[in-house]
Amino acid sequence: MDVTRRTVLSAVAIAPAAALLTDRTPARAASPPGDVVGKISVGYQGWFACPGDGAPIGGWWHWSRDRFQPPSPANTTIVSWPDTRDYAHVYPTAYTNLGDGRPATLFSSYDQQTVDTHFRWMQTHNIDTAALQRFNPVGDEGPTRDAMAWKVRSAAEATGRKFYIMYDVTGWTNMQSELVTDWAGKMSAHTASPAYARQNGKPVVCVWGFGFNDDGRPFAPAACLDVIHRLKAQGCYVIGGVPTYWREGKNDSRPGFLDVYHAFHMISPWMVGRTGTLDGLDWFHAQVNTPDQADCNAHGIDYQPCVLPGDLSAGHRRHGDFYWRSIYNMVRLGAQGLYVSMFDEYNEGNQIAKTAETAASVPAGSGIRALDEDGTFCSADYYLRITGDGGRMLKGQIPLTAVRPTPPTTGSQPPPVTDLARGRPTAASGHTQVYTSGNAVDGDGGSYWESVNNAFPQWIQVDLGQAATVARLVLKVPPSWGARTQTLAVSGSTDGTAFATLAGSAGRTFDPAAGNAVTVSCPPTRARYVRVGFTANTGWPAGQLSALEIYPA
């Protein structure tokens, strides 16, 4: 069964933001620096497969709801699209082509080249340690999970990264009897690798899911304590991936589990889905994380809070400001280490791995948000770069700062200009013959939309998929056509029903000497639906466009 760490409870009500601090009061470290204390770790799923990659599980594992059918808008488990330019081997899907016309392809985690690429990204951006997720290995996922551990080991050894096994007990009915057996009989073999993470001289292993208040993790405290004690008896340094409210035993945490939580060497509370705002992060810092750290200090436990880039599909990221606030709050707290959720979680939109930059790099018409979803262009590696800077701040290599030091792009060149309309769904008042509205956003200067003739007014509309800041339109007719003036206006809407004027009606001259292109500027305005309305055309009795391009501020 495919399982996910989709948020267990809805985010709690958020109180007003706590004031940002500019000084850092280090917490008392229970352990000296090692491979998780004083380091930045990332959760690594490694759970994507494609037909033909050799994975024992077969099919489109974790890409499709029905893994035996190719991923498409109607058969998908993902909400974000990866940037695949660094992969040597990709697999065609049933999605439409990307906005720029390239085939919509996806990677397989089972390809060693994919894992090697991911760990090179970690090496480039100074990410110290990867926590390889391991769900119930007794069922049909087992052989694939076993192989992924070897692939991750190989990549970690080649790049000087560390890794450890992170068990997820979700849906694992016989966890108590099988988890330690799996560790002792299989996974402990990887501790022979110099790349296997150690803390306080002990191999690191994490167990995620004890104490969560849901049916997928129904284990009693005694069973959980038994597993922790047996792993310790195996000589392990044991991390607990625990509920957000572990200390208070409420909301996402069952009561009566405090002895379980205090048995771990390190505690790493879950945060995904708990908030999507800066004020929310500040509230958690003051009301949850600060007393968490005090409790860990009092019990000699290392604290590894979860930091996260935000759900891209829900518009939480604020071009990196959400992620930086998450990191900053935990570093100023004095946390012993940081756990990033996640490296490659395209299913929940909280991945830091390279992601599609613009609408040109996601399947046309899919509605999947790219990194520029709020109008700010961000390079595909942006969240990897933020992670690297966050790690440096954690280690004291750069000063503690609430101001994000990482620019959305690198180098001195301006970022690419993003046409928000390319490949997006369109609508129109009507069209003539084969000259449909989609021709205006297909990137082909020779194809065009033509409205019903002799029947003004007419209009054409683009659905951007989500609200964006619209500041400029570029309208074109085929470059070989003669000059004409079209009287047109531009309006925008967030809901497709109530439209407001962005640019008033005026005659716009399309001149072949200027490429038959017209620029229409407007005050920066949030809109999802952008409509161009026509009331006259001196060249033909219809509205005509070969390109309708929309650009952010």
Image: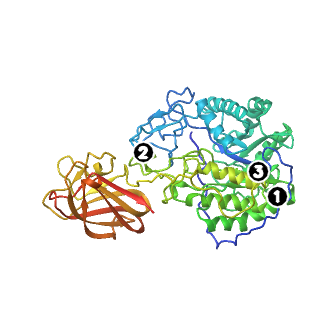
Density class for disc 1 (Cα within 10 Å; few <14, some 14-19, many ≥20) is many
**Residue marked by disc 2:** 363
Which mark, residue 221?
3
Does residue 491 lie above or below 540 as drawn? below
Residue at the front extreme of this rendering? 513
**Residue marked by disc 1:** 296
Residue type at mark 1?
Answer: Cys
Q: Is residue 242 visible?
A: no
Residue 441 shown left or right of residue 395 in the figure? left
Q: Nearer the viewer, mark 3 or mark 2?
A: 2
Residue type at mark 3?
Answer: Pro
For the residue pair 281 and 508, the one nearer the viewer reads as 508
Reading the chain from its start, which is encountered first: label 3 or label 2?
3
For the residue pair 355 and 163, the one nearer the viewer reads as 355
Reading the chain from its start, which is encountered first: label 2 or label 1?
1
Q: Position of residue 33 (x, y in %)?
A: 83, 48
Which mark, residue 42?
none
Does residue 52 lie above or below 339 as drawn? above
Helix, strand or loop at label 3? It is helix
Residue 432 shown left or right of residue 68 in the figure? left
Q: Is residue 62 visible?
A: yes
At x 69%, y 54%, the residue is 306
Q: Position of residue 277 (x, y in %)?
A: 59, 64
For the residue pair 518 and 17, the one nearer the viewer reads as 518
Can you tell which quarter of the image residue 334 is in? Answer: bottom right
CA gap between label 2 and label 1 equals 46 Å
Density class for disc 3 (Cα within 10 Å; few <14, some 14-19, many ≥20) is some
